[in-house]
């Protein structure tokens, strides 16, 4: 009898361990830390490289900003998180740092509030099309094993992402989505920027405030792109490279 009890207990513990290992979470809240390599970005934007080399010490090496993502398998909201003081050497406001992005996974649409200089746009369009290739590389981020994927936007913008299929939300920072799990780490070389999760919550997540922004000039992705191109033409190459910040 004692032997049977031991076997039964071992069986039950085995089942519990298996269930624990196979847990999946459909509702999550993630805090992201975004790092922008300021000097590398300025170096690429500035056409006069000799001027940059002489003045690079006027810029910080990098800049941090924070964002919050809350979502489930039907919808999500990505918005600015805690404020951090700007480095006094940053003589301009970081580009696209106040985007608020609502994603409806079921309807396949995004509604994004994008402040652009003196104007605020409210972009509503279909989800951003990203061609993903999933690799075998694994990296642990915020306690979750994440698989690496490489994405391509408009056949020109490369995205490196690490997603966890334990987190069942197919989202990520800004409007990046479309993988079989939540993106906890991401890099866009074109922007010299990375996003990494610093905290993940999976219990008692409040979804009541996951609603789209309503203020701003209503546009589509195509119209905001064409309007920005007109404005940025006056800035030359520098301006054309900044447009990407408002389109992801």
Image: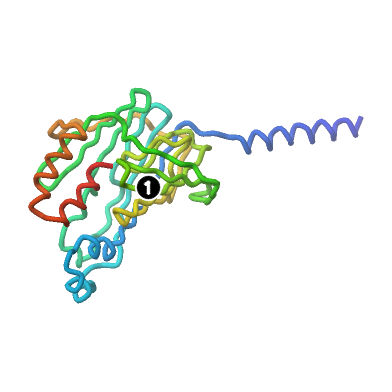
Which residue was labeled with disc 1?
159
Q: Nearer the viewer, residue 37 or 34?
A: 37
At 50% across and 41% down in the image, what residue appears?
164
- Extreme residue in the bottom direction: 54
Q: Quadrant of residue 77?
A: top left
At 39% across and 26% down in the image, what residue appears?
74
At 51% across and 34% down in the image, what residue appears?
25
* Vertical comparison of 205 with 155: above or below: above
Give the x, y percent position of residue 12.
75, 32
At 15% across and 45% down in the image, what residue appears?
116
Give the x, y percent position of residue 95.
21, 52
Give the x, y percent position of residue 179.
44, 37
* Vertical comparison of 121 with 160: above or below: above
Split into 4 quadrants, where in the image is the N terminus?
A: top right
Disc 1 crowd, CA 10 A, few/some/many (<14, 14-19, 20+): many
* Element type at mark 1: strand
* Vertical comparison of 90 with 165: above or below: below
Give the x, y percent position of residue 245.
24, 47
* Vertical comparison of 147 with 70: above or below: below
């Amino acid at each position: 009898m004692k032997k049977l009890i031991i076997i039964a207990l071992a069986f039950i513990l085995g089942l519990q361990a298996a269930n624990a290992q196979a847990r999946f979470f459909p509702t999550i809240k993630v805090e992201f830390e975004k790092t922008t390599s300021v000097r590398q970005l300025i170096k690429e934007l500035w056409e006069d490289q000799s001027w940059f080399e002489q003045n690079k010490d006027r810029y910080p090496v990098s800049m941090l900003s924070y964002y919050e993502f809350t979502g489930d398998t039907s919808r999500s909201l990505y918005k600015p998180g805690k404020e951090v003081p700007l480095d006094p050497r940053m003589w301009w406001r970081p580009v696209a740092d106040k985007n608020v992005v609502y994603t409806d996974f079921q309807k396949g649409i995004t509604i994004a509030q994008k402040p652009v200089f003196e104007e605020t746009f409210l972009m509503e369009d279909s989800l951003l099309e990203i061609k993903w290739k999933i690799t075998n590389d694994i990296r642990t981020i915020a306690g979750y094993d994440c698989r690496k994927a490489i994405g391509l936007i408009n056949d020109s913008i490369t995205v490196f992402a690490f997603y966890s299929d334990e987190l069942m939300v197919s989202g990520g920072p800004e409007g990046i989505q479309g993988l079989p799990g939540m993106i906890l780490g991401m890099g866009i070389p074109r922007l010299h920027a990375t996003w990494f999760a610093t905290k993940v919550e999976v219990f008692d997540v409040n979804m009541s405030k996951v609603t789209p922004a309503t203020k701003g000039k209503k546009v589509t992705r195509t119209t905001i792109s064409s309007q920005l191109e007109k404005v940025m033409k006056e800035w030359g190459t520098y301006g054309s490279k900044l447009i990407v910040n408002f389109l992801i």
